[in-house]
Image (spheres, coloured by chain):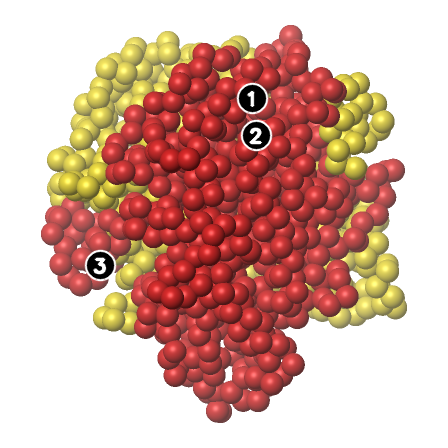
Chain colours: A yellow, B red
């Protein structure tokens, strides 16, 4: 089948979709619907969309839209190694870091699947050498802490996953093997705070920068090295406390200033790099290689599930399509991601990058301006915390914000107890279920201030427990959802030209070449 | 002068405002404008609005709007103890926790200023007893850690301020006196994780709940007590490790199960409570009473500055008014708060509650439905981190999101160095200045993918350094901005009826009284 790339507003199914009014949840959200509008997916996860405003007729049109935009075929092209990032003429291979679902991808005589697998094996070997004390710090002490120095995709995804795995790993027999910290911001206070928390003798630093030229990361490396040198600890050699994750052509590759370098390549975008060496090294050091392997297996299972053409059986695809209806027909601009799981406290911040950097675009994949809305604004905090914060606005504000709930039957630590005849986990999930219905159905009241309009849409991803495997599936669900939305909007979800102008102007300031007088004033104000 | 409460769309100045098209920043944002569109305010802070799309004619209309809505007069009424939370028939007295700017406020023969001041003195005495070891844990060890158990306003504000002060206090002579942790979520993994980090023998827990009935907080108290009892430490007595911050009529008041109780009252809303005992106890324990006093002084100075009727000299008021123009004339729905300061990493999460819970309302202060948009959706992460995350969407997405930048000339720890001829702080602020101009002026390019449309509005709050005093001023700036917007929209910014329905339904679940069949299905799904 030949693949064509068409703007959303050229699809007849989109025209049909625009004619469909939303389901009325107050009357339509029945027990039967709540039970049947659900799709099982990888890692024990289910996607329940009963509280989204779609009916059978919407699903039929969305199925046609998916076919007209050939989203499954485009996904297969991506898996087969076609150039799916046309702006940068690159393949998009992050799926391959967790398993193969397409043709052999060979670049300059190298099989990319083997390349990623070999880096993972190198990381596992290195990790074992660290864990068993074969490699120690320069003063002979075993490493007990790892500090990842990176920003953007080298920070947000790995950090969110690190926090998400901590409870489940600590509660397991193996426990947590090393503590992890992260330095990202060029604000010197970020590195200063972390350096006060760690012992340089027992700390391994990981520099993560694909290009090897990221200003924040190189600056923080130098701050860390200076702090180590200033520590006065005899024999402390920074070079023996650093490893790098970078591309083979970067200045960080194979340097004598690092213990070891591990490689990624141009086909793994930053925000999609958590399952590559970028996430592998820090997570394997913290929790052991088998934990990271389980995460990869969960992500791979979700990638496989996302190949299903029937949208009623493809959670990531239906999630994406419902998002198009809400965005482009009902004019919703923001999605709140609301995990009822403290472990996912920074997962919304990762999704913020994943979604907003991928699909916050105003040109299509050919670089032509488009005339419809694209990517959502993403925000979110864990429940029940959010209930005591911004839910007022979500329930009774003048905007309607679609909600993406996430929940699990079991907690991670297993340290729970019954208080007033229910456990904390039961209270947590009672709140989650209650919120879905409260948002959907609202409440009539003679006092308008106590009235809830309802018809505030949500979906729910839920599973038994947040484990490495289900976390991998959850991560891939959102990566694939974002990818599908990119196909539907006909944008390139894999470049990020919008970050360049700020960099350019900042460099002009730092090299004394400011050519805008207003800019010069701002520079002075902040001096 | 008599005060009248009028809907925004009843003001003639609002009609005028709707007729004004925005300034064109690409041509109008000159050096002169950058230097002159600025207001100095308390705590060494300045509010620069040169990159907001307003001209002199906008300012004139906004001044009239401010007068027509009598916002300064309403603020004075609030300070004088009038019932400014009509839904709950309550006064709004958080300003009084930092100083008096109005009439004596007497409730049941008690002067409220004295009441708040006396609670602060009790906290300071208690704090000194803890710090000098006069009060120790039940096994005789000195307290070195404080854990605040609270949710919403009892968590977000105090936590954001705790993080914001850490660097500056650690870098000072006095240093940090006690470590602090926070437990908020009813997810049992939240308490489990914190309890693994602290030593129960040397930890003081603060229960914070105005009503003394907050489900999450009471549940977490009981989890903590159980964990202490299960610790097997001989002589460990939870009652001697707990203090409470609550109202005098709450079940937590004067209990023998706590070392001490400190009091707030119904006139301090949760999201406005950081400068009351809710923030005072934890922050005084962590950093010393004089640090908290400095924060109060900064907030008081900003409260005073906010009484200025001339909008060209009132930063909080002009910030509020510009927000009305963007929201109600230009249809912007979201504001991104972007502090170029790692210390403010959780400040946007606090503002999210402050703004969205205060003004996310669809009825006016009389409980009548209104027909215009109110409160913004708030999101934000520190720069430069955000640049590598969601700025793509802000620069090149199809929505325009107003931006609220915050920056400081100096870092907190003072541990900085020159790398490539600039310090980290200089790099940080070069990025901040560059982003303001990049968003405002954009960039033409023959390749539409490299084109930046510009006209993406921002304002900048900046100061010399983030200190306790300037942090207090910053906090009060936003509190007062939100209050002014509430007056302009004619909503009650001090109630939160929107949180009730979810609570009600959750309680039905937990007491086995579910009367909605779809809800029962969701409860089962999550079991």
Image label count: 3
**Quadrant of the image occupied by residue A162:** bottom right
Q: Which mark is residue A96?
A: none
Residue at image location 26% in from the left, 32% down from the top: B369
**Going by the image, does B110 lie left or right of A455?**
right
Query: Does label 3 or label 2 sit earlier along the sequence?
Result: 2
**Corner quadrant of residue A211:** top right
Q: Chain of mark 3?
A: B
**Could you tell me if residue B154 is visible in this image?**
yes
Q: Is residue B244 above or below residue A345?
A: below
Question: Is there a contact, CB below 8 Å, between mark 2 and mark 1?
Answer: yes
Residue A272 visible in the picture = no
* Mark 3 crowd level (few <14, some 14–19, many ≥20, 10 Å Cα): some
Say which residue appears at 50% left-offset and 55% top-offset.
B96
The picture places residue A505, in percent across and down from the top left corner, at 74, 25
Quadrant where the image shows the C terminus of chain B: bottom left
The answer for which chain carries disc 2 is: B
B329 versus A273 height, above or below: above
| Left or right: residue A325 compared with residue B473 | left
Q: Give the image quarter of residue B293.
A: bottom right
> Viewer-proximal residue, B343 or A5?
B343
| Of the image marks 3 and 1, the number of the one nearer the N terminus | 1
Q: Which mark sits nearer the N-terminus, 2 or 1? A: 1
Q: Which residue is mark 3?
A: B507
- Crowdedness of circle 2 by 10 Å Cα count: few (<14), some, many (20+)? many
For the residues beneath circles 3 and 1, the answer to whether they share a chain is yes
- The residue carrying mark 2 is B311
Mark in the foreground, 3 or 2 = 2
What is the spatial separation of the Cα atoms under label 3 and label 2, in whole angstroms?
Answer: 47 Å
Question: Where does the image place residue B117, in percent across and percent down from the top left?
Answer: 53, 65
């Amino acid at each position: 089948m030949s693949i064509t790339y068409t703007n959303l507003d050229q699809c007849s199914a989109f025209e049909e979709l625009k004619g469909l009014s939303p389901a009325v949840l107050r009357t339509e959200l029945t027990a039967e619907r709540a039970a049947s509008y659900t799709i099982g997916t990888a890692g024990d996860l289910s996607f329940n969309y009963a509280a989204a405003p779609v009916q059978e007729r919407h699903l039929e049109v969305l199925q046609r839209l998916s076919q007209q935009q050939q989203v499954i075929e485009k996904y297969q092209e991506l898996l087969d190694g076609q150039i799916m990032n046309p702006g940068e003429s690159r393949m998009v291979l992050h799926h391959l870091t967790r398993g193969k679902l397409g043709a052999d991808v060979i670049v300059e005589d190298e099989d990319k699947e083997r390349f990623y697998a070999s880096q993972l094996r190198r990381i596992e070997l290195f990790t074992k050498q660290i864990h068993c004390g074969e490699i120690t710090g320069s003063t002979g002490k075993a490493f007990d802490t790892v500090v990842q120095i990176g920003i953007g995709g080298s920070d947000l995804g790995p950090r969110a996953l690190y926090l998400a795995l901590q409870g489940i790993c600590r509660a397991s027999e193996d426990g947590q093997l090393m503590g992890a910290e992260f330095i990202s911001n060029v604000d010197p206070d970020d590195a200063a705070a972390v350096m006060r928390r760690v012992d340089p003798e027992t700390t391994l630093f990981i520099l993560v920068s694909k290009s090897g030229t990221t200003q924040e990361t190189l600056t923080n490396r130098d701050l860390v090295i200076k702090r180590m040198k200033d520590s006065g600890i005899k024999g402390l050699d920074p070079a023996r406390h650093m490893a790098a994750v970078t591309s083979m052509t970067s200045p960080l590759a194979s340097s004598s200033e690092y213990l070891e370098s591990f490689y990624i390549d141009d086909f793994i975008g930053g925000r999609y790099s958590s399952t590559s060496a970028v996430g592998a090294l820090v997570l394997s050091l913290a929790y052991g290689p088998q934990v990271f392997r389980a995460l990869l297996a969960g992500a791979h299972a979700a990638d496989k599930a996302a190949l299903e053409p029937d949208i009623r059986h493809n959670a990531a695809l239906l999630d994406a399509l419902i998002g198009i209806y809400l965005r482009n027909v009902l004019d919703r601009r923001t999605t709140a991601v609301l995990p009822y799981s403290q472990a996912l406290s920074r997962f919304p911040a990762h999704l913020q990058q994943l979604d907003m950097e991928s699909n916050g675009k105003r040109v299509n994949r050919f670089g032509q301006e488009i005339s419809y809305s694209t990517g959502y604004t993403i925000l979110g905090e864990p429940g029940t915390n959010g209930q005591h914060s911004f839910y007022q606005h979500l329930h009774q504000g003048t905007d309607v914000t679609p909600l993406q709930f996430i929940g699990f039957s079991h907690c991670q630590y297993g340290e729970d107890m019954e208080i007033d005849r229910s456990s904390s986990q039961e209270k947590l999930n009672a709140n989650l279920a209650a919120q879905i219905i409260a948002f959907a159905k609202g409440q009539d009241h003679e006092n308008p201030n106590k009235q809830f309009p309802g018809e505030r849409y949500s979906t729910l991803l839920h599973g038994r427990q947040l484990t490495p495997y289900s976390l991998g599936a959850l991560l891939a669900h959102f990566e694939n959802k974002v990818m599908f939305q990119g196909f539907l909007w006909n944008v390139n979800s894999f470049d990020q030209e919008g970050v360049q102008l700020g960099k350019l102007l900042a460099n002009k300031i730092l090299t004394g070449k400011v050519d805008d007088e207003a800019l010069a004033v701002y520079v002075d104000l902040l001096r």
